[in-house]
Amino acid sequence: MMGNYFGGGYGYMGGFGFFFMLLFWGLVIWALITLVKAISEKRQSPSEIKEDEAMKVLRERYAKGEITKEQFEQTKKDLNG
């Protein structure tokens, strides 16, 4: 009657406990890495956001034919500094 409560000395979940522990911690680490990447990608300064928007508008105007290639290249050069 005084036998091992968890059965056979393998722990509560048998031989799978170690596997599930590794899986759990692997998922936790993966989630943290994904969260850090998402936060760091969203951190753009307001000047970077304005430059991105300006380049988008410039590309759209060039694609529509509103400006020539020379005007596009000059404005692009001006925006990049």
Image (spheres, rainbow, N blue to C red):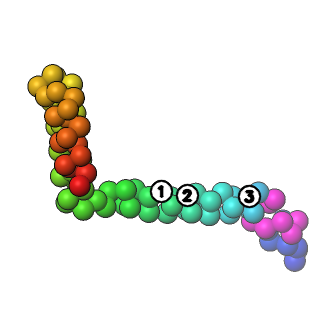
Q: In the structure shown, which secondary structural element does the residue marked by tag 2 occupy?
A: helix
Q: CA distance from mark 1 to mark 3?
A: 22 Å
Residue at left offset 55%, top offset 58%? 30
Is 80 one of the magenta-colored residues? Answer: no
Q: CA distance from mark 3 to mark 2?
A: 16 Å
Disc number for residue 19? 3
* Sequence-first tag of 1 and 3: 3
Residue at left offset 51%, top offset 61%? 33
For the C terminus, the image quarter is: bottom left
- State the image quarter where residue 20 is shown: bottom right
Q: Is residue 52 left or right of residue 12?
A: left
Q: Is residue 71 left or right of residue 33?
A: left
Disc number for residue 34? 1
* Sequence-first tag of 3 and 2: 3
Q: Which residues are magenta?
A: 8-15
Q: In the structure shown, which secondary structural element does the residue marked by tag 3 occupy?
A: helix
Residue at left offset 20%, top offset 32%? 70
Counting other residues with Cα less than 10 Å from the Cα at mark 1, is it few (<14), some (14-19), or many (20 or more)? few
Tell me, yes or no, whether the two marked residues, 2 and 1, touch with CB atoms within 8 Å. Answer: yes
Q: Is residue 15 left or right of residue 36?
A: right
**Type of amino acid under label 2:** Trp
User: To which residue does mark 2 refer?
Assistant: 30
